[in-house]
Image (cartoon, rainbow, N blue to C red):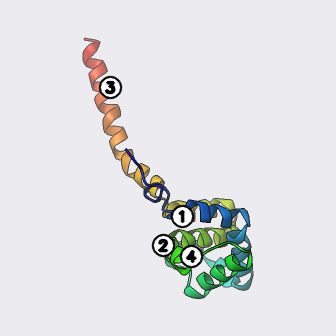
C-alpha cells in the first residue's frame, strides 16, 4: 500500500521544504518578524488561537527562498502554504517564548499528532477489555 507523504506530514513537496529548512529560512525570517512585532508576546494563548501568518509574510518568505537560490514556483508555494504558514508561526513562537511554545504551535496542525490524539480514548477501552479478559482467564 502506498502512503502519500502529504497525508502523514502535511508537506506536499518534502525535498523543497528540506532545502528551505537547511538554509534556515523559516528560523531567520521568523526571528526577524518577531523582533519587529513584540506586541505578539503579550499573550501566547491569543497568538496560538488568533494569530495568522499574513500574505505579506508569505511573499517575503517566497522572495527569501528565491534569493537563497532555491528553485520554487508560485505553484509550489501555494500547494505547501498550510505547512509553510504553520512552520513560520511555530518559529515566531520559538523566537518569542522558546522551544516549548514552538512545539505546541507545530503540533496543533500536525496530522500524525492529531490522529494519535484521537486514539487515546480507545486506549482506555482496550486496557479495560484486556483487564477483564485477563480476570476471566484467572477464574
Dot 2 falls on a residue whose secondary structure is helix
Q: List the residue tagged with mark 2.
A: 79
Please indicate whether residue 138 sits to the left or right of residue 110 in the image. left
Is the residue under label 1 in contact with that under label 3 (CB below 8 Å)? no
Upstream in sequence: badge 2 or badge 4: 4
Is the residue under label 2 in contact with that under label 1 (CB below 8 Å)? yes
**Badge 4 local density, few (<14 within 10 Å), some, or many (20+)?**
some
Q: CA distance from mark 1 to mark 2?
A: 8 Å
Q: Is residue 29 above or below residue 98?
A: below
Mark 2 or 4: the one toward you? 2
Q: List the residue tagged with mark 1.
A: 13
Dot 3 falls on a residue whose secondary structure is helix
State the residue at coordinates (65%, 79%).
61
Upstream in sequence: badge 1 or badge 2: 1
Q: Which mark is residue 47?
A: 4
Q: CA distance from mark 2 to mark 4?
A: 24 Å
Residue nearer the viewer, 13 or 128: 13
Please indicate whether residue 58 sits to the left or right of residue 23 in the image. left
State the residue at coordinates (70%, 71%).
25
Residue extending farthest to the top is 139
Name the image quarter holding residue 21. Answer: bottom right
Q: Which mark is residue 131?
A: 3
Dot 4 falls on a residue whose secondary structure is helix
Residue extending farthest to the bottom is 56
Upstream in sequence: badge 1 or badge 4: 1
Dot 1 falls on a residue whose secondary structure is loop
State the residue at coordinates (41%, 50%).
3
Upstream in sequence: badge 3 or badge 2: 2
Amino acid at each position: 500500500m502506498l502512503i502519500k507523504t502529504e497525508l502523514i506530514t502535511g508537506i506536499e513537496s518534502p525535498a523543497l521544504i528540506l532545502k528551505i529548512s537547511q538554509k534556515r529560512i523559516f528560523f531567520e525570517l521568523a526571528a526577524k518578524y518577531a523582533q519587529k512585532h513584540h506586541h505578539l508576546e503579550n499573550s501566547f494563548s491569543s497568538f496560538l488561537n488568533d494569530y495568522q501568518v499574513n500574505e505579506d509574510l508569505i511573499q517575503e518568505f517566497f522572495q527569501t527562498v528565491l534569493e537563497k537560490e532555491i528553485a520554487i514556483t508560485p505553484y509550489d508555494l501555494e500547494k505547501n502554504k498550510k505547512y509553510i504558514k504553520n512552520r513560520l508561526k511555530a518559529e515566531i513562537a520559538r523566537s518569542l517564548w522558546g522551544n516549548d511554545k514552538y512545539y505546541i504551535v507545530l503540533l496543533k496542525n500536525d496530522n500524525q499528532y492529531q490522529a494519535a490524539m484521537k486514539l487515546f480514548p480507545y486506549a482506555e477501552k482496550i486496557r479495560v477489555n484486556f483487564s477483564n479478559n485477563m480476570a476471566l482467564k484467572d477464574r
